[in-house]
Amino acid sequence: MRKRLLPMLILFLVEFAASQAVQQSRTLIINGQSGQVSVLQMNGRSFVDLEALAQLANGSLGFQGDQIVLSLPASAANAPAKAPSARPPANSAFSKEFMTAGIETMSVIREWRSALANAIENGYPVSANWVESYRARAVQSLRLASVAASTDSDQQALQLLTDELDNMQKWSDKILKARKDMDAAKYMSPDALNNDPLFQKILNCAHSLAAMSASGQFQDDGSCH
């Protein structure tokens, strides 16, 4: 009688255990590689088919006697964790303080450039003292901008402002020398400024700085170098 009941009891236990398990299709991710596998959940634990696991990891599954051999590629088994970035990406935006000081510097240099260009086009006298007043204001304004520069973008834009001021000073000295050498006539023609490479460079840099200021982002197009 016991021999007849034992198989029935084993069959009952197997069917009972299976009734307590829940099989679901889940996404399994191994070292960044994902795939769908069947997961059996029973008694709070999750079981995955070894063959499906090997296929997902591009490995192999074999049997040697009573041993199960699961082989995974070295790149998958020993892939190092991705190191966190040492620092966040650089922010190309300007600080508020530098934006204000930079715009003021651009305005002062533009006023100097316009006044000198107007004097050339209309034959007005240009003196060293008159030019010096504009230069002093521009230098002071640039100094305030350098104090306000706090970010990498601020420092990069500050260098372009410095280049613009240096070129403006060179052009101003060039005009003063021409006046002193009584060679001002060549600057009185209608196309004098259009044919002056240094003036055009200053003008192009001013346009580039103005566009940068409008966007609030550092973008060097090479106009000021």
Image (tube, helix red, strand yellow):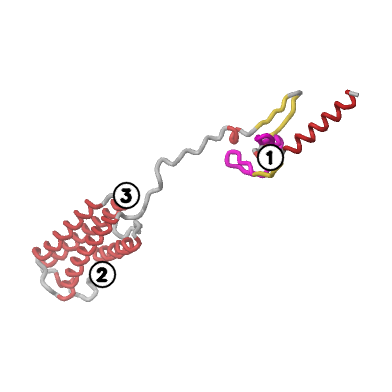
Viewer-side residue, 82 vs 119: 82
Quadrant where the image shows the C terminus: bottom left
- Which residue position is annotated with label 3? 152
The spot of residue 79 in percent (x, y) is 55, 35
Mark with earlier residue (3, 2)? 3
Q: Which one is closest to the eye, mark 1 or mark 2?
A: 1
Left/right placement of residue 106 relative to residue 178 reads: right
* Residue nearer the viewer, 99 or 5: 5
Residue 48, image x and y in percent?
68, 36
Please tell me the numbered disc located at residue 195. 2
Residue 39, which numbered label?
Answer: 1
Q: Amino acid at mark 3?
A: Asp
Mark 3 vs mark 2: in front? 3
Task: Say above or below: 163 vs 27.
Answer: below
Element at label 3: helix
Residue occupying image coordinates x 35% and y 57%: 217
Magenta-colored stretch includes residue 5 = no
The residue type indicated by label 2 comes to Asn
User: What residue range appears in magenta?
Assistant: 27-51
The outermost residue toward the front is: 1
Secondary element at image label 2 = loop
